[in-house]
Amino acid sequence: MPGWGRLHRWLGLTLSLWLVLVSLTGTLLFYKTELLQLKYPQLKLTEIPDHQDAARVFDRFDAGHAFLPRADKPWIEVVDVSGTHQYFNAAGEHLLSREHMGDWISWFVEFHHHLLLHELGKDIQGYLGLASLLLVVAGLVKWWPQTWSRRLFTIRWAWPWQKNFRATLWQLHRVTGVVLLIPLLILLITGTAIMYSAVVSDSLTRLFPEQHQVTSMPAVATEATSWPQRLRTAEVLFPEMEPRLVYLDRARIRFKYEDEWHPNGRSYMQFDPFTGALVSWQDIRNQPYGTQLAQMVYPLHVSAIGGVSLLTLLVAGGIALIVLPVSGVWFWLWRQRRKKVA
């Protein structure tokens, strides 16, 4: 199918640099905690702070948001209004300040999320994500064999200075795309869906509007005017939930229930900042099934579920999304050079 072949070739050449960079940064960010601890050894903490340790640190700040410590992030982390990340240990001692765009890890995060262009970058990421899905479909249609054999999945290795390297490039490109099709599709589909999260959530909610009330807001009198009081109240009222994130200027806590995929959860408890009264409660399990399904997209993309097995699969997919454009463009350049010689 020559039309699909031309579409695959020109989309590949157009998207190759973006695919390499966004896949490289995304694959490295699977190991963000390890990279932070490598660059900042003071973050290699052996004692994980508890919620009350964190709450006492939160009381020092009036704005921004903060993350509760957990096993994969064993520190207290506060993000102020300027975007600077402040890190503390269990004793409340300040360990580190990371300014927004102040190190290469922050640059990687911003590039992977927004191409360093804020909301405009998010829009561009969405368009490029859709184009990359069309690229994969075109490549699959172009490759689809009339007869199947083991040779379709064979790579005969040769080095660039050897005669058969052209065949190696072609086989590497073809086999990588086919063998690792599932993980690279997971990454591309979920990554694109994140860029269009509102549309995806609305569409899934329309498809699956059913909902089941599992919890309701307790009718209790509270006077939780400090973060230690708010977290204690939350743990008493909803022991099956784990607080993960707080909004410092809004007296709002975000929770994760035990079987929820999202690493920070999508349930909220809102206190009155002045009186300390509990004023609202939102449980993701009370939301329509489509809304709950939409909240599974991000955790799948970042391998927040599935343990080592899914992480290994998605890292392989990320590497495939680097190998494919490199091998494809290299093969195309080799052919162009041969045509000029001929």
Image (cartoon, rainbow, N blue to C red):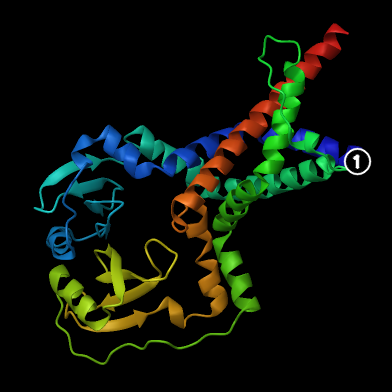
Query: How many tags in the picture?
Result: 1
Residue 189 in sight: yes
Q: Residue furthest top?
A: 341
Residue 211 x/y as whole percent: 53, 85
Residue at point 31%, 48% (across, down): 83
Circle 1 residue: 1
Q: Is 91 left or right of 80, judged from the image as shown?
A: left
Q: Residue furthest bottom?
A: 219
Residue at point 69%, 29% (across, down): 172
Residue 102 x/y as whole percent: 31, 35
Figure quadrant of residue 202:
bottom right
Give the residue type at disc 1. Answer: Met
Pick the residue in front: 3 or 107.
3
Figure quadrant of residue 170:
top right
Q: Residues within 10 Å of mark 1 (few under 14, many from 20)?
A: few
- Does 73 sit above or below residue 291? above
Residue 227 x/y as whole percent: 16, 68
Where, quadrant-wise, is the C terminus in this rendering?
Answer: top right
Residue at point 44%, 54% (across, down): 307
Q: Is 78 left or right of 7, judged from the image as shown?
A: left
